[in-house]
Image (cartoon, grey):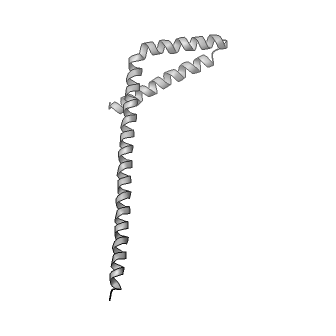
Amino acid sequence: MSRNNAFMFSMGLIAGVIGGIAAGVFFAPKSGEESRKELKDTVCDLYDKHAPQIIDAKKQALESIDLVKYKLERQFRKMNNSLKSKKMAKAKELEDSENGNEHEFDY
């Protein structure tokens, strides 16, 4: 399994577990205070059991975000440079055509 697929699987697993826990707590026939305490205890237990995986998933997510940010910035610079070079070429073309028109009428 590739690194990206493993990351997506672990994120889906974590989201599914949290969603299942929350749904179970919210639909349980208990008082609000009791439900909130149970939810808090369950989430704390889940975090304690899976802290290394959560930390690793967070690290992978941040690395992925940094990579996407780098790629977007690089693509933006390429597009910006391309636009600048096209503008410069157009300006040079206009300048050359203006200089060429001045020499036409020097007879």
Question: Above or below — where is 23 with respect to 30?
Answer: below
Q: Is residue 104 left or right of residue 12?
A: left
Residue at x 35%, y 51% (from the top left corner): 78
Question: Which quarter of the figure is the N terminus placed in?
Answer: top left
Query: Quadrant of residue 59 in the image?
Result: top left
Give residue 105's position: percent from left, percent from top: 35, 86
Of 30 and 75, the residue lying toward us: 75
**Residue at (34%, 76%) from the top-left corner?**
99
Residue 74 location, x and y as percent?
A: 35, 45
Q: Total number of numbered labels?
A: 0
Quarter of the figure with residue 97: bottom left
Q: Is residue 19 above or below residue 105?
A: above
| Left or right, 34 with reference to 8 | right
Name the spot of residue 30 as percent of width and height, x first: 65, 12
**Residue under the image location 40 percent in, 30 percent down:** 62
Horizontal relation, residue 22 to residue 101: left or right: right
